[in-house]
Amino acid sequence: MAQKSKNKTANKMWGGHYSMAPSEIMQQINASIDFDRKLYRQDIAGSIAHAKMLAKQKIISKTDSSKIIKGLQQILNEINSGKFKFKTELEDIHMNIESRLREIIGDAAGRLHTARSRNDQVVTDFKLYVRDSIDNLISKTDILIKTLNIKVKENIDVIMPGFTHLQIAQPITMAHHLSAYVEMFKRDKSRLNDARERMNYCPLGSAALAGTSYNIDRNFTAKELGFKAPTSNSLDSVSSRDFALEYLNCLSILAVNLSRISEEIILWCSNGFRFISLSEKFTTGSSIMPQKRNPDAAEIVRAKVGRIFAALTNLTIVMKGLPLAYSKDMQEDKEPVFDATENILLCVQAVNGMIDDMKVNKANCLHFAKQGYSTATDLADWLVKNLNIPFRDAHHITGKCVKLAEEKGISLDEISMEEFQKIEKRITPEIFKVLSVENCADARTSFGGTSRKNYK
Ligand code: ARG
């Protein structure tokens, strides 16, 4: 069936050589206004900088430039207050704003698009959006790091089991465990900062692909918009989205790190552990089991990695094999970036909320630290250091001690002196010092180790 044209007239922006309106399905597949309206602030900021520059360079008159800027400010208010009418037939945010500008200020609006194309306009808007998002995400991550550091200070004396293979391995402190995440999130922040540095160059003025014959001042617009400098190659400027890919890479790694701390929260809240509890502020009840308190927020953060990685994969595949310069494929860059941005911001704040909310069960952490013969390595080290036994043999002797304790259902510090000496006659009562989990943790004074000395 032939597609009907909803609008009888051709698009005003290229009506000069177009006499027919697009088919309805063409309009539907082509329009991006439903999602790129999110870029209105950046689009208006970009246009204001451009209008200022055009007047400064005497490409348009000061009067027209002022009219344009005033009109754009009015549009900003209209959109902010929900009064603006977005039109699908005007395709995208750029044409919606320009068309409204013409309604407000008349013909002078037509001068705004001098020495500019939607190709450099859209990538400028998008870069501003990504940069704003980086700044927002860095500040939210900073808050999370601060919250973690408060918990680190509060939990220096909480001894808990450290795990390998999720099997109890050696006693550590809760402070040391949480501080591992501080390191991870600090790297996430630094990755975002690096990406920001690399992307902070302004594409505006690259025009459609080849630059422009007008005497524009790209340094001026770059400065106006807070960029370090203008981009160096017009083709690259309009057709590269690697800044967005790098941003999504940063988000993906951050999402993985957030999913790991969320998984710990889930485990630590579970009946098998009970290292921490979350209040009613950060849990949900069950509609059938009145006793339940479920860590839903942590589970959702764990799952969000899926869509954040999907965004990265999505945009990577959109860009793969695209020849220079702009192709409409690139319109598909926005939704994954918007979705990943909104979700990662939620995740960082949710994890911050849970960390702030968590109550540590010190007694239970200690109880578990004593399970699983977590001081066995120290027993072996004592044999090496005090009896000059080679580590391999010490490991073997310790294995025998663990076996004995297992058979008797006791912990290592409950083995009697007599029994120890049956296994290795040179063992002295000094051994009991290293068998306590507290001493065991404190003995790890090496740089970066768990010892409480490293935290005081
Ligand atoms: N809506 C478009 C996008 O997001 C704007 C650029 C359109 N450029 C063009 N030559 N059709 O990519």
Image (spheres, grey):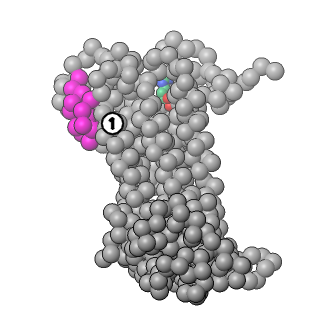
Q: In this view, does 92 lie to the left or right of 104?
A: right
Residue 179 figure quarter: bottom left
Mark 1, secondary structure of its residue: helix
Whether residue 336 is situated above or below residue 12 in the rendered picture: below
Q: Where is residue 416 in the image (x, y as percent from the top left)?
A: 58, 88
Residue at which label 1 appears: 198
Viewer-proximal residue among 414 and 165 = 414
Image quadrant holding the C terminus, namely bottom left
Viewer-proximal residue among 419 and 356 = 419
Residue furthest front as drawn = 425
Q: Which residue is drawn at 81% across and 21% down?
A: 1
Q: Which residue is drawn at 53% across and 79% down?
A: 425
Residue 44 figure quarter: top left
Q: Which residue is drawn at 44% across and 62% down?
A: 180
Q: Position of residue 342 (x, y in %)?
A: 52, 52
Q: Where is residue 227 in the image (x, y as percent from the top left)?
A: 27, 38
